[in-house]
Image (cartoon, rainbow, N blue to C red):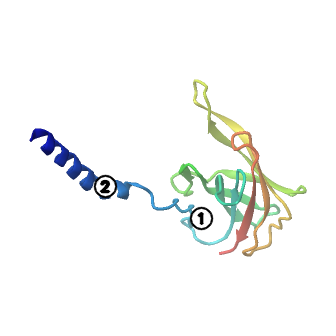
C-alpha cells in the first residue's frame, strides 16, 4: 500500500510540475534589442550590427549619436549590446557617452578604446576598436544599410552593416 501511495504522489508531482516546467521552457528565441532613444531624442543616429557567420543573429550592436555640425562629424556611443545579453547604456547624464574619432580615409572609419575582460589579475584591459564604414557619406540619411567591418581583437574582426538616420 505504501509503494502504491508513493507511486501516486510521484505521478501527481509529474502532472503538477509538467505545466510549470513548460512555462520555464522558452517558446522562441528572444528578440534582438532595438536601438533605444537617448534622453535627447533629436539628432542623427548611426546604428551598426556585426555578425559571426550569417546575418541571422548579430553578435554585437553599437548605437551612436552623430553631431555633424563641425568640420568632422563627432560620434558618441549611446549603447553596445552583445548576443549574450550583456548591454552597456550611456545616457550622457549619469556618465558621459564614449567619444569615437572619425577618419575620412577610404573606407571611412570611427575608432575608440574599450575595456574588455581578460584572465589577468586586474580582470580587464583596454584595447583599440574601430568600425570601417564602406561607402559611407556622413551627411546622408535614410533607411539604407551599408557594409561595415568591426576591427577589434576582443570581438574578432566581424563583418556587418550600419544605417544612419535623422531625427
Residue drawn where x is 14% and y is 39% of the image: 3
Q: Secondary structure at mark 1?
A: loop
Residue drawn where x is 31% and y is 59% of the image: 19
| Residue 18: numbered disc | 2
Nearer to us of marks 1 and 2 is 2
Pinpoint residue 45: horizontal percent, then vertical percent.
Answer: 68, 67
Pinpoint residue 93: horizontal percent, then vertical percent.
Answer: 53, 57
Pinpoint residue 94: horizontal percent, then vertical percent.
Answer: 51, 53
**Quarter occupied by the C terminus:** bottom right
Against 167, is 153 above or below? above
Real-space Cα distance between discs 1 and 2?
A: 37 Å
| Residue 116: numbered disc | none
Quarter of the view holding residue 66: bottom right
Residue 16 falls left or right of residue 115 = left
Residue drawn where x is 70% and y is 60% of the image: 55
Of the pair 107 and 145, the residue shown nearer to us: 145
Q: Secondary structure at mark 2?
A: helix
**Quarter occupied by the N terminus:** top left
Residue 93 falls left or right of residue 62 = left
Label 2, residues with CA under 10 Å away: few <14, some 14-19, many ≥20: few
| Residue placed under numbered mark 1 in the picture | 35
Tell me if I can see residue 95 in this picture.
yes
Quarter of the view holding residue 122: top right
Quarter of the view holding residue 118: top right
Amino acid at each position: 500500500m505504501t509503494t502504491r501511495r508513493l507511486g501516486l504522489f510521484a505521478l501527481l508531482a509529474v502532472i503538477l510540475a509538467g505545466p510549470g516546467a513548460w512555462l520555464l521552457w522558452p517558446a522562441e528565441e528572444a528578440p534582438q534589442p532595438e536601438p533605444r532613444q537617448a534622453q535627447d531624442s533629436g539628432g542623427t543616429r548611426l546604428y551598426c550590427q556585426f555578425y559571426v557567420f550569417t546575418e541571422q543573429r548579430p553578435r554585437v550592436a553599437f548605437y551612436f549619436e552623430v553631431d555633424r555640425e563641425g568640420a568632422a562629424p563627432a560620434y558618441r556611443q549611446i549603447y553596445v549590446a552583445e548576443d549574450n545579453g550583456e548591454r552597456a547604456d550611456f545616457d550622457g547624464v549619469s556618465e558621459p557617452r564614449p567619444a569615437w574619432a572619425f577618419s575620412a580615409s577610404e573606407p571611412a572609419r570611427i575608432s575608440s578604446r574599450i575595456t574588455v575582460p581578460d584572465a589577468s589579475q586586474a580582470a580587464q584591459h583596454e584595447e583599440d576598436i574601430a568600425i570601417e564604414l564602406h561607402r559611407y557619406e556622413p551627411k546622408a540619411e535614410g533607411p539604407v544599410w551599408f557594409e561595415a567591418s568591426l576591427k577589434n581583437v576582443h570581438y574578432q574582426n566581424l563583418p556587418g552593416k550600419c544605417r544612419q538616420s535623422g531625427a
